[in-house]
Amino acid sequence: MKVSFHGHSIVKVEAGGKTILFDPFITGNSQTDLKVEEESPDVIILTHGHGDHIGDTEALAKKKNALVIANNEIARYLGWKGLNTHPLHIGGSYQFDFGRVKLTQVFHGSAVEDDDKKEMIYLGMPTGVLLMAEGKTIYHAGDTGLFSDMKLIGERHPIDIAFLPIGDNFTMGPEDAAVAAKFLQAKTVVPIHYNTFPLIQQDPQKFIDLLDGQNGKIMKAGDAIEL
């Protein structure tokens, strides 16, 4: 299994003969190495409805009818736009041909902005994602603050690699993310969701230095790990 990071919250996984893209915010992402015209995922997994996570989902999914996996509200919203979707919700999981996907709770928001009408369209509860494939478990925390049930997530699902936001302001900062890493006890922990915008400027090394004996890894856009 190949797992790569592509700036902000974009994670790409190649498993089960599929290319799986998490939160494909490419257009307008100052940190990514990806280009929409060069990407053609088989599966897109979304953590929540904010624009810096849904991103280019519609354009990417329409290339070859990619399956979009998200909470029920996002799945229905994107289904109305003609996308091929599979709805899940917090605590629920489903076995796909490439692996099992389970949504976990987080503490954040989830909505898409309609700039013309100056309104927000609510898109259900935000989530984290557990992807279990080829005998490995990946945890993408999405956007969240620290919460103690991360201990249960780690105990119930031994995690090979966890992607945790550290940007502060909208999510955990480095200090709380280090506590989250301790709760989760993942074999490898990667910081995400930082330096894309002025409000979330962070030094990822600060997060790595706070880890308690865990394998923290700063991944630049395009870096990959073989699990």
Image (tube, rainbow, N blue to C red):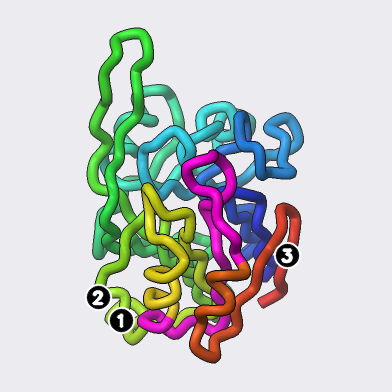
What residue sits 57% from the left and 28% below the top? 62
What residue sits 47% from the left and 79% below the top? 159
Say which quadrant the C terminus sits in.
Answer: bottom right
Residue 151, labelled with which disc?
1
- Vertical comparison of 99 with 181: above or below: above
Question: Are the two marked residues, 1 and 2, in contact with CB atoms closer than 8 angstroms?
Answer: yes
The quarter of the displayed image where residue 145 is located:
bottom left
Q: Mark 1, residues whose alpha carbon is within 10 Å: few (<14), some, or many (≥20)?
A: some
The outermost residue toward the top is 116
Question: Are the two marked residues, 2 and 3, in contact with CB atoms closer than 8 angstroms?
Answer: no
What residue sits 65% from the left and 38% below the top? 30
User: Dot 3 corresponds to which residue?
Assistant: 224
Q: Amino acid at mark 1?
A: Lys
Q: Amino acid at mark 3?
A: Ala
Give the CA distance from mark 2 to mark 3. 30 Å
**Does the segment drawn in magenta span residue 33?**
no
The quarter of the displayed image where residue 103 is located:
bottom left
Say which quadrant the N terminus sits in.
Answer: bottom right
Between 145 and 223, the residue placed more toward the observer is 145
What residue sits 40% from the left and 22% below the top? 81
Tag 1, which secondary structure? helix
Which residue range is magenta in the image? Answer: 182-204
Q: Amino acid at mark 2?
A: Ser
Residue 193 appears at what percent x and percent y?
A: 51, 52
Q: Mark 2, residues whose alpha carbon is within 10 Å: few (<14), some, or many (≥20)?
A: few
Closer to the chain start, of discs 2 and 3, is: 2
Between 207 and 221, the residue placed more toward the observer is 207
- Relative side of 109 to 99, left or right: left
Closer to the chain start, of discs 3 and 1, is: 1
User: Dot 2 corresponds to which residue?
Assistant: 148
